[in-house]
Amino acid sequence: MDGTNGTNEERKGDAKGAMNGKPSKKDVANDFLLCNRCGSCRSVCPLLPVYREEWAGGRGKVELAEGFFKGEKLDDREMQKVFDLCLHCMTCEENCPSGMRADEIVMAVRARLAGRGAMPRMKRAALWMLGKADGILFRPARALGLVRRAPLHGVYGRGPLSFLYPLLGWPRERFIPLPAGKPFLGSGTELARAADIAAAPAGWTEGKRPRAAAEGRFDEAKAARLLDLVAAARRANVAAGRRAYFFVGHAVNQFFPEEARAVTRLLNLLGVDVIAPKNQVCCGAPVFYAGDIAGARAAAFDLLEKFEGHSYDWIVTTCSSGGLMLKEEFPKLFDLTHDGYFEIDWDEEKESFFRVPNRSMVKQEYPRAEDLYRQYVGGKVRDANELVAELLGLRPEGSGLVGIFDASAAPAAAPAGAA
């Protein structure tokens, strides 16, 4: 055992501290100790009503994982089928009274299975194709004119290739969207300056008033308050020369370029310059959540190198999985925290699970990863909505958007920049 993981008593102490609401180091080995089999996760798991089997829920997966890491005879292919069903919605974690992280345990099992070669070949092929999607899918589709002609939101219907779906075991009704005519990255300038667009004029809401007023949804005071907040944020950010790196993400880039343009314009309106380099790459989320940790680590480092050399206050994204990877999973992949990426093992003598760090291997293979992460990513990642709320001075304790229009609130102050 590695001494950095502490004794069995220390690990149990960390677990008890977490259950009592006291700060403790996160460690996946402690998550096994935290599960008290209460079944709270069963009531919220979206899979349980579908499969109606114990293994479908968080509690069942934790029990299977315990047997798996203890070396019980469990078929790897069957384990792969069960643990591939987890959606990583983290609802079980949010509702667990003891704070047990079933999603981390699921990831540990997937990683061990992938390391044993249990990942299905079709899944490996699909992940490979996903990584090459721009060259082997999107560019050919655009060359053949297979692009959407209208906004994608709210669209449902059969695609032009739906007649092939039964060959893949899919129903004909499955909807696979077509890409937009042009991706966002590369179709415009890489730097959108706030100074290049006009500030919101006093009559900015005039065009909205007639219809909204007729429906009883327009409030003059609230509109004026919003304009004041936007103007204050714009003045502060332009004066400070603040800039955001827009990490677009593949799905938004290929399918929702209008969303990326709207985010860029909104941040410009708030006085923030936006850079969106066209050489952005995938964060590695698809292969990471499939359990291919080595592949995810390589993709993550490739992205870290793309940030190098740029200057910005925030990394902003509308991709939830990409934001989560940058905030939470990159430090684990490069073992920058006590909860860093791991192998799980079982101590028969002490009857306890423990985490086996691979810090030395990561340091040898990616010696620059820690410096790149701390300089270009750590503390800077924001969801687009999160950053807009921050720029407008929306208080965390406020009740939703109502907080923006609180007349007692002070005008938006200059934001605090990157941590």
Image (cartoon, rainbow, N blue to C red):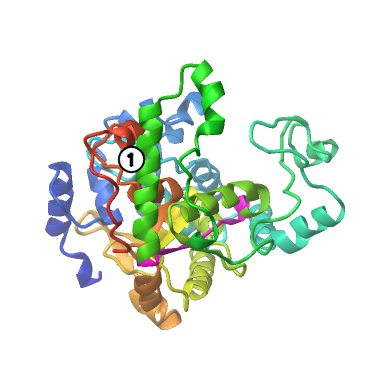
Residue positioned 81% across, 53% down in the render: 141
Number of numbered discs overlaid on the protein picture: 1
Residue 270 in percent (x, y) is at: 43, 52
Quadrant of the image containing the C terminus:
bottom left
Q: Amino acid at mark 1?
A: Glu
Q: Which residues are magenta?
A: 240-252
Is 243 contained in the magenta span? yes
Image vertical order of residue 266 relative to residue 377, above or below = above
Residue 217 in percent (x, y) is at: 46, 21
Decide: few, some or many residues near mark 1? Use Cα within 10 Å; few <14, some 14-19, many ≥20.
Answer: many
Residue positioned 66% across, 57% down in the render: 130
Q: Is residue 164 visible?
A: yes
Residue 209 in percent (x, y) is at: 51, 26
Of residues 139 and 9, which is closer to you in this image?
Answer: 139
Task: Kindly identify which residue carries mark 1.
Answer: 93
Quadrant of the image containing the N terminus:
bottom left
Of residues 246 and 78, which is closer to you in this image?
Answer: 246
Q: Is residue 341 visible?
A: no
Furthest-right residue in this view:
144
Of residues 12 and 224, which is closer to you in this image?
Answer: 224
In the image: residue 243, left or right of residue 178? left
Image vertical order of residue 132 relative to residue 406, above or below = below
Of residues 380 and 286, which is closer to you in this image?
Answer: 380
Furthest-front residue in this view:
202
Residue positioned 40% across, 48% down in the render: 388
Residue positioned 26% across, 64% down in the render: 338
Q: Which element carries disc 1, helix, strand or loop?
A: helix
